[in-house]
Image (cartoon, helix red, strand yellow):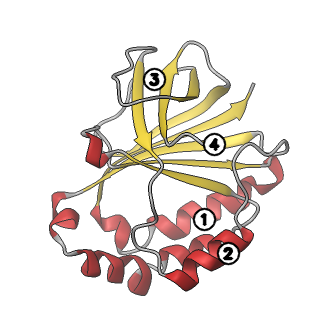
Amino acid sequence: MNNTIFDFVGGTIGEWKVIKMATIKGDNLPEIPYINKISSSLIKNDEGIWTLKGIVSNLRYTEKAEKEQLVAIQEDLGRPLATQAAFIPLRKSAEWWNLAQDERRKIMEESSKHTQTGLKYLPAIARKLFHSRDIGEAFDFLTWFEYAPADEEAFEELLYALRKTEEWNYVDREVDIRLIKV
């Protein structure tokens, strides 16, 4: 994945078949049978039933030691055995964005232990975060996870652990879309 801009096109064709779609918080997205993740540009894409755009960016709340730990064990997307995925667009509240960056970091790492929690599930679960807030999209982040069917239970544990943290109190919109590779 050398490109940094991607479109997630929800429609009637795609490389990932939707097996479950649930609105966790806030407004839903229209139901779709497939998602296609494609390299893109900042030009608006009107394909499919809906399109969400995201940019791969720098790690914003991760300190050097944490980054080194992540890089040492995190696998990239597209592994042959990772035939299941979760696409979870989310938006955080204005209250979150009104906090200073050091306050957000403190909640994410000291209180919620976001990175440490994620590290427990690597390398089984590959993850990529796409930023959308700065380009005026409906969600702040588009999270994409890939894993083998044998790691589905571990993925559910990871989501449960993250969703019960203080950080998740600031999420005001979240849609959980589960997928299988076609």
Report which residue position mark 1 lands on: 158
Q: Nearer the viewer, mark 2 or mark 1?
A: 2
Q: Earlier in the sequence, mark 1 or mark 4?
A: 4
Q: Nearer the viewer, mark 1 or mark 4?
A: 4
Determine whether label 2 and label 3 are within 8 Å by CB. no
Three-letter amino acid code at the position of disc 3:
Glu
- Local SS, label 1: helix
Considering the image in quadrants, where does the C terminus appear?
Answer: top right
Report which residue position mark 3 lands on: 31
Three-letter amino acid code at the position of disc 4:
Met
- Local SS, label 2: loop
Q: Earlier in the sequence, mark 4 or mark 3?
A: 4
Q: Nearer the viewer, mark 4 or mark 3?
A: 4
Q: Earlier in the sequence, mark 2 or mark 3?
A: 3
Query: Which residue extends farthest front?
Result: 2
Three-letter amino acid code at the position of disc 1:
Leu
Report which residue position mark 2 lands on: 120
Three-letter amino acid code at the position of disc 2:
Lys
